[in-house]
Image: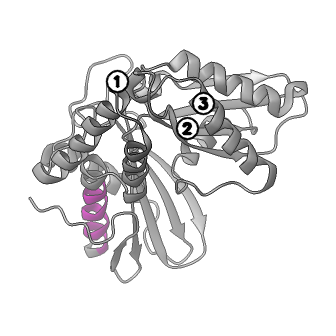
Amino acid sequence: MELEKIIRDTAKNLLKLSAIVLPPTVEKALRDAYERTPEGPGKVQLKAIIDNIEAAKRLKKPICQDTGVVSFYLKVGDDFPLKSGLKRILTEATVEATREVPLRPNAVEILGSNTGTNVGTNIPWVVIELTEGDYLEITAFPKGGGSTNVSQVKMLSPGLGMKGVLTFYIDSLLNAGAAGCPPYFVGVGIGGGENVCVELAKKALLRPIGVRAEGELGKLEEKMIEAGNLLKIGAMGTGEGPTVLNVSIETACRHPASLPVAIVFSCWALRYSTARVAKSGEVEYLTHRGIVLGT
């Protein structure tokens, strides 16, 4: 029971951290973008973003009114003593975080109304990866509606190859325009099937910024960043400053007749937080080391 409480409190704190404090690498990418953007409307928008980041930390309030739909990504060690109860515990943590942070209620039943708690049918979405060890790693990943609405998935002809993937990415950026609050962080999922490529793309957003895929895929990531910024959508659609701050690609083997591709956007507020809970109950925060948010 004590370990259950530790997991619940940790998950609740991860939701609070992710809502209020951007991961340091995300904040650094935005500050670097501000520094290299010439004076003008784009720089003004980036300054407003940085001011917003600082105000959220100072006031201990969510960085955006849209606190997103809640997902948790878990790594569960073979020797970690709790497994089947994890979704229940995370659901309880989400309800508590909704009330205490507070988080805006964003869970609407398909044939009903807003649940008011950010939990409901299949939400929070929980993805579990089994691994060696005696620890539980939890990543809270609340994702807002604006960037979700401009995300895209398409079944390409395999003959189009990576050229077709790049074209689809550019088309998706043009379609998104400023609607998803750029500058964007972009996850690209290729292969696996229609469901797999979307999940790959979303998880790609959690890869540390600037860490490239190996070989040709890493070169494609760099090409996508360069091509995206040539579109001149700019910070919040001003046409100035960066359009894309990072692109990460994840892949899976594909069917010979299929080339599924998903482009998942995050707005400038790429929010997630990760902690590791040991079998002993000791908690280590990985993305937000040393950051404490009091009540």
Verify CB contact (< 8 Å) between mark 2 and mark 3. yes
Residue 210, percent across and down? 57, 54
Residue 44, percent across and down? 29, 32
Which residue corresponds to the image point at 53% horizontal and 24% vertical from the top-left? Answer: 232
Determine the secondary structure under disc 3: helix
Q: What amino acid is at disc 3? A: Gly
Instruction: Assess disc 2: are there few (<14), some (14-19) or many (≥20) residues with their C-alpha within 10 Å of its C-alpha.
Output: many
Instruction: Check the picture and name the quadrant holding the C terminus.
Output: bottom left
Q: Name the residue under label 2.
A: 186
Q: Name the residue under label 1.
A: 109
44 vs 27, nearest the viewer: 44
144 vs 47, nearest the viewer: 47
Displayed quadrant of residue 104 = top left
Residue 81, percent across and down? 44, 75
Gap in Å between the C-alphas at discs 2 and 1? 28 Å
Gap in Å between the C-alphas at discs 3 and 1? 35 Å
Q: Name the residue under label 3.
A: 228
User: What segment carries the magenta color?
Assistant: 3-14
Q: Is residue 236 visible?
A: yes
